[in-house]
Amino acid sequence: MWSTIKFLGTLFISFIAMIGALGAENPFPLFAVAWGIWILYIVCLRTKRKKELDRERLIREILDKL
């Protein structure tokens, strides 16, 4: 559920930034915001996945010792 909220927030922020870039005199800062928010979202997903994999590896090690 939280991932969906983050995705929709990222989508909304990047959409607003891209729409703003259409009428801006200098659109590059808004492009940076739009792409930057997607980079942050992907990094956040990767760290969450890494934590899940580490937890799964730890459980496997514990079960192998039994």
Image (cartoon, rainbow, N blue to C red):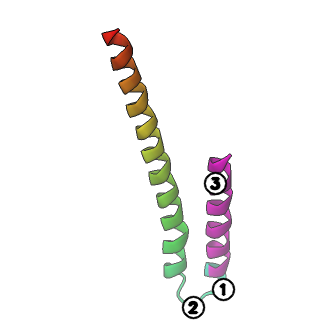
Q: In percent of the image, x 65 and y 80: which residue is there? A: 20
Q: In percent of the image, x 35 and y 18: which residue is there? A: 62
Is the Cβ of the residue at disc 2 closer than 8 Å to that at disc 1? no
Q: Is residue 19 magenta?
A: yes
Q: In percent of the image, x 49 and y 80: which residue is there? A: 28
Place residue 50 in its image quadrant: top left
Between marks 1 and 3 in the image, the one whose residue lies nearer the viewer: 3
Q: In percent of the image, x 31 and y 11: which residue is there? A: 65
Up/down of 50 relative to 56, above or below: below
Q: Percent x, y for residue 39? A: 47, 59
Q: Amino acid at mark 2?
A: Glu
Label 2, label 3: how many angstroms apart (C-alpha)? 29 Å
Q: Is residue 56 magenta?
A: no
Q: Nearer the viewer, residue 51 or 41?
A: 51
Label 1, label 3: how many angstroms apart (C-alpha)? 25 Å
> Magenta residues, as a range?
1-20
Q: Which mark is residue 23?
A: 1
Residue found at the far front of this picture: 66
Is the Cβ of the residue at disc 1 closer than 8 Å to that at disc 3? no
Q: Nearer the viewer, residue 16 or 64?
A: 64
Q: Percent x, y for residue 2? A: 64, 49
Q: Amino acid at mark 3?
A: Phe
Which image quadrant: the C terminus?
top left
- Callout 2 environment at 10 Å: few (<14), some (14 to 19), or many (20+)? few
Read off the residue under disc 2: 25
Q: Amino acid at mark 1?
A: Gly
Secondary element under disc 3, as helix, strand or loop, is helix
Tell me the chief SS of the magenta region: helix
Q: Nearer the viewer, residue 18 or 11?
A: 11
Along the polypeptide, which appears first: circle 1 or circle 3?
3
Q: Percent x, y for residue 61? A: 33, 19
